[in-house]
């Protein structure tokens, strides 16, 4: 269940379902497209595809000054968008965030590295394409609800 991370756009969710279907077929366990959509919804912590679709389709676009929440290097945060700019032809954007409270981005007891303002590149799903060693995006951000 991934309900604590921002949702990607509907197109990316559908692409995940197609990939799931392809991988299931390779394993000799074909599934229908609707089953794949339902499994994607379950993964994101929603009861069914219709609820996930509605939630993802109604997510407001990020803009400067907007209050946001998310996860940066494994640490939950709230704050606001300090800057936002287009970054290349693939829909990526450079975002600068100012956290309400600094977050410690080091997970060692003997060392800390606090951050309150960070910049990163995010994709159309408001996640950084770069991932940590556990497969999570460096940054995932969404409008504060």
Image (cartoon, helix red, strand yellow):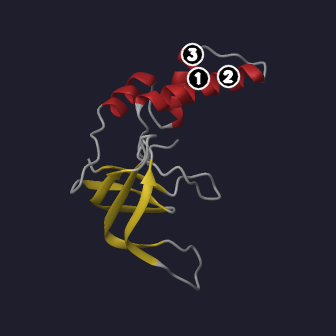
**For residue 37, side relative to residue 52 (left or right):** right
The residue identified by callout 3 is 33
Which marked residue is nearer to the observer: mark 2 or mark 3? Answer: 2
Q: Which one is nearer the viewer's eye here, 62 or 136?
A: 62
The residue identified by callout 1 is 18
Q: Residue 13: where, in percent of width, then height?
A: 48, 30
Mark 2 falls on what kind of element?
helix
How many C-alpha atoms fall within 10 Å of the one at disc 1: few (<14), some, or many (≥20)? Answer: some
Dot 1 or dot 3: first in sequence order is 1
Image height of 135 relative to 74, above or below: above
Which marked residue is nearer to the observer: mark 1 or mark 3? Answer: 1
Q: Which mark is residue 22?
A: 2
Q: Residue at x 50, y 71 (%)?
A: 105
How many C-alpha atoms fall within 10 Å of the one at disc 2: few (<14), some, or many (≥20)? Answer: some
Mark 1 falls on what kind of element?
helix
Q: Residue 101: where, in percent of width, then height?
A: 32, 72
Q: Determine the CA span between mark 1 and mark 3.
A: 7 Å
Q: Is residue 39 visible?
A: no
Q: Residue 33 occupies which quadrant of the picture? A: top right
Image height of 56 relative to 96, above or below: above
Q: Is residue 6 visible?
A: yes
Q: Which one is nearer the viewer's eye here, 65 or 29?
A: 65
Confirm or deny contact between disc 1 and disc 2 (CB under 8 A). Answer: yes
Q: Which mark is residue 53?
A: none
Confirm or deny contact between disc 1 and disc 3 (CB under 8 A). Answer: yes
Q: Residue at x 33, y 62 (%)?
A: 97
Q: Residue at x 27, y 40 (%)?
A: 60
């Amino acid at each position: 269940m991934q309900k604590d991370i921002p949702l990607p756009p509907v197109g990316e969710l559908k692409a995940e379902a197609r990939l799931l279907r392809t991988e299931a077929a390779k394993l000799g366990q074909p599934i229908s497209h609707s089953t794949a959509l339902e499994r994607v919804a379950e993964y994101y912590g929603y009861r069914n595809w219709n609820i996930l679709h509605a939630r993802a389709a109604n997510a407001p676009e990020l803009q400067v000054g907007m209050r946001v929440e998310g996860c940066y290097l494994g640490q939950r945060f709230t704050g606001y968008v300090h800057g936002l700019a287009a970054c290349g032809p693939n829909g990526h954007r450079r975002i600068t965030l100012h956290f309400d409270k600094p977050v410690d981005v080091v997970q060692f007891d003997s060392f800390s590295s606090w951050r309150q303002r960070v910049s990163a590149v995010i994709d159309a799903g408001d996640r950084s394409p770069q991932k940590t060693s556990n497969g999570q995006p460096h940054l995932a951000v969404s409008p504060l609800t």
